[in-house]
């Protein structure tokens, strides 16, 4: 039973749990795979498009991606899974800040789809975990809070760097003379 395809939510029998996982899949699809590129088999989502916005697009994408980590923690994902999810988001955010190269990386890395797969794999390994059983495992709640705080701090750092670059560019153009 552990070899079920990732697009079959039937491994989880609790309807509330299925809804939560479906919501994560849909959100991930919107962020990473919503738009087909004509003439190719490749898809991109809103995340790489948001990343094109100078001075904060990648950090806005990071905030959206944090929702998946939050939901994974609510479903009882292990510290290892939550850490890998945070690393995926941080890598996409940091590399995404590099002009041009970062935008291509954003479209290729698809951290949200990777993170949903991590959650699905974790749930499969747990063997038909119900919402009630997951809710009884609060030990990772504080760890999830720490990861989210870390992501917020990275967001603040990226925002500060973006503002510093903007100020530097404007000073170079003579806007503050």
Image: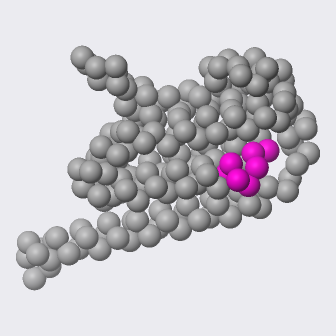
* Quadrant holding the C terminus: bottom left
User: Residue at (47%, 30%) from the top-left corner?
Assistant: 30
Q: Is residue 145 visible?
A: yes
Q: Is residue 167 above or below residue 40?
A: below
Residue 21 in the image, given as x and y percentages of width and height: 68, 29
Magenta run includes residue 132: no
User: Residue at (56%, 27%) from the top-left corner?
Assistant: 26
- In the image, the segment drawn in magenta is 76-82
User: Residue at (25%, 70%) from the top-left corner?
Assistant: 165
Residue 134 in the image, given as x and y percentages of width and height: 85, 40
Residue 95 in the image, given as x and y percentages of width and height: 37, 56
Indicate left or right for 28 with 15 as reference.
left
Q: Is residue 149 above or below residue 27?
A: below
User: Residue at (31%, 51%) from the top-left corner?
Assistant: 102
Task: Tell me which corner region of the image, top left, top right, bottom left or bottom right, holds residue 118.
Answer: top right
Task: Tell me which corner region of the image, top left, top right, bottom left or bottom right, holds residue 158.
Answer: bottom left
Residue 52 in the image, given as x and y percentages of width and height: 28, 46
Q: Is residue 50 visible?
A: no
Count the numbered circles shown.
0
Q: Is residue 39 above or below residue 150?
A: above
Q: Please, which colouring scheme is shown?
A: one colour
Indicate left or right for 42 with 142 as reference.
left
* Quadrant holding the N terminus: top right
């Amino acid at each position: 039973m552990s070899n079920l395809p990732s697009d079959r939510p039937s491994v989880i029998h609790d309807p509330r749990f299925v809804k939560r996982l479906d919501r994560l899949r849909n959100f991930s699809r919107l962020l990473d795979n919503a738009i087909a590129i004509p003439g190719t088999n490749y898809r991109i989502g809103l995340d790489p498009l948001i990343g094109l916005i100078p001075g904060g697009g990648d950090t806005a994408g990071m905030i959206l991606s944090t929702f998946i980590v939050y939901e994974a923690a609510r479903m009882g994902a292990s510290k290892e899974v939550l850490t890998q999810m945070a690393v995926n988001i941080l890598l996409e955010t940091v590399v995404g800040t590099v002009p041009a190269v970062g935008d291509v990386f954003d479209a290729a890395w698809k951290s949200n789809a990777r993170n949903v797969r991590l959650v699905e794999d974790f749930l499969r390994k747990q063997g038909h975990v119900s919402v009630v059983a997951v809710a009884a495992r609060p030990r990772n709640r504080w760890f999830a809070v720490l990861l989210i705080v870390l992501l917020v701090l990275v967001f603040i750092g990226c925002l500060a760097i973006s503002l510093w670059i903007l100020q530097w560019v404007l000073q170079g153009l003579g806007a503050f003379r």
